[in-house]
Image (tube, rainbow, N blue to C red):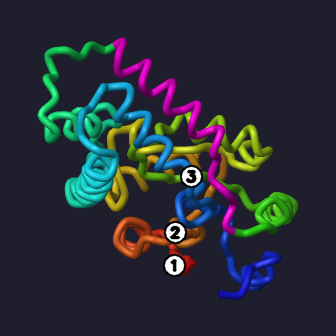
């Protein structure tokens, strides 16, 4: 795929607002993060299984819960995913309390920032700057799983990207997931509070045909399928 270096692809198009998916559209995981997170999960909850099995379980429930979210349009919380994994490994959930789950997430968040995602396009910052200069407003619209919206907001701010967006919407914060039209309605509601914009003048860009493209089209947005 040719790396997009400018906003020339928007020339002549009547878009006033661009909605961006996050994962595999703007950023991708650091290859070291998941293995470190899985090891922490095993150690923190003192699981007796080998790391290969633990990693398989984490991956399995990551995929399953993401699929459920796409089918129902709702959101399975981060803690709920971890509880499902622990239960599948025979862990006694009665030993858990809210404080333990919060402490685990704090530790996993540290690993996330030690092994941060990378931007897929090295020209991302310049593209956002150019879009702002053209008067185009922008937002992030992302489904979440193991990493919460609060963490992703902080990551974008730390990388000097957060200020480019007028707002950010994450599934764990609103309990809707793409492709549910309700989450796209939340986006449009925030857009039209600031300026008159037709749905067709909103372009949603994402890598997932089901969640991003089909969901946005069903609501009435224009779409662009990002193929990484």
What mark, if any, has residue 166 been given in the picture?
Answer: none
Which residue corresponds to mark 2? Answer: 206
Which tag, 1 or 3, sits closer to the chain's start?
Answer: 3
Which tag, 3 or 2, sits closer to the chain's start?
Answer: 3
State the image quarter where residue 3 is shown: bottom right
Q: Residues within 10 Å of mark 3 (few under 14, many from 20)?
A: some
Which residue occupies 56% across, 52% down? 32
Left or right of 102: which side holds 86?
A: left
Which residue occupies 71% across, 43% down? 162
Left or right of 84: which side holds 106?
A: right
Q: Residues within 10 Å of mark 2 (few under 14, many from 20)?
A: many
Which residue corresponds to mark 3? Answer: 32
Badges 3 and 2: C-beta atoms under 8 Å apart?
no
Stretch in magenta = 99-120
Say which quadrant the C terminus sits in. Answer: bottom right
- Residues at marks 1 and 3, CA–CA distance in whole angstroms: 27 Å
Closer to us: mark 1 or mark 3? 3
- Residues at marks 1 and 2, CA–CA distance in whole angstroms: 6 Å
What mark, if any, has residue 225 been given in the picture?
Answer: 1
């Amino acid at each position: 795929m040719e790396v997009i270096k400018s906003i020339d692809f928007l020339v002549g198009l009547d878009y006033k607002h661009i909605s961006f998916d996050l994962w595999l559209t703007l950023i991708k995981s650091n290859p070291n993060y998941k293995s470190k997170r899985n090891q922490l999960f095993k150690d923190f909850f003192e699981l007796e299984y080998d790391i290969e099995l633990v990693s398989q379980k984490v991956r399995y429930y990551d995929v399953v819960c993401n699929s459920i979210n796409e089918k129902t349009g709702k959101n399975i919380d981060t803690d709920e995913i971890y509880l499902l994994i622990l239960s599948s490994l025979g862990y006694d959930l009665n030993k858990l309390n809210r404080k333990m789950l919060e402490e685990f997430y704090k530790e996993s968040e540290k690993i996330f920032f030690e092994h941060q995602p990378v931007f897929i396009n090295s020209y991302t910052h310049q593209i956002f700057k150019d879009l702002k200069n053209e008067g185009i407003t922008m937002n992030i619209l992302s489904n979440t799983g193991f990493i919460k919206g609060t963490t992703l907001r902080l990551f974008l701010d730390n990388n000097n990207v957060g200020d480019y967006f007028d707002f950010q919407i994450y599934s764990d914060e609103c309990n809707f997931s793409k492709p549910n039209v309700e989450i796209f309605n939340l986006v449009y509601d925030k857009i039209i509070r600031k300026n008159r914009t037709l749905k067709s003048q909103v372009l949603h860009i994402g890598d997932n045909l089901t969640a991003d493209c089909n969901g946005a089209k069903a609501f009435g947005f224009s779409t662009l399928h990002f193929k990484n």
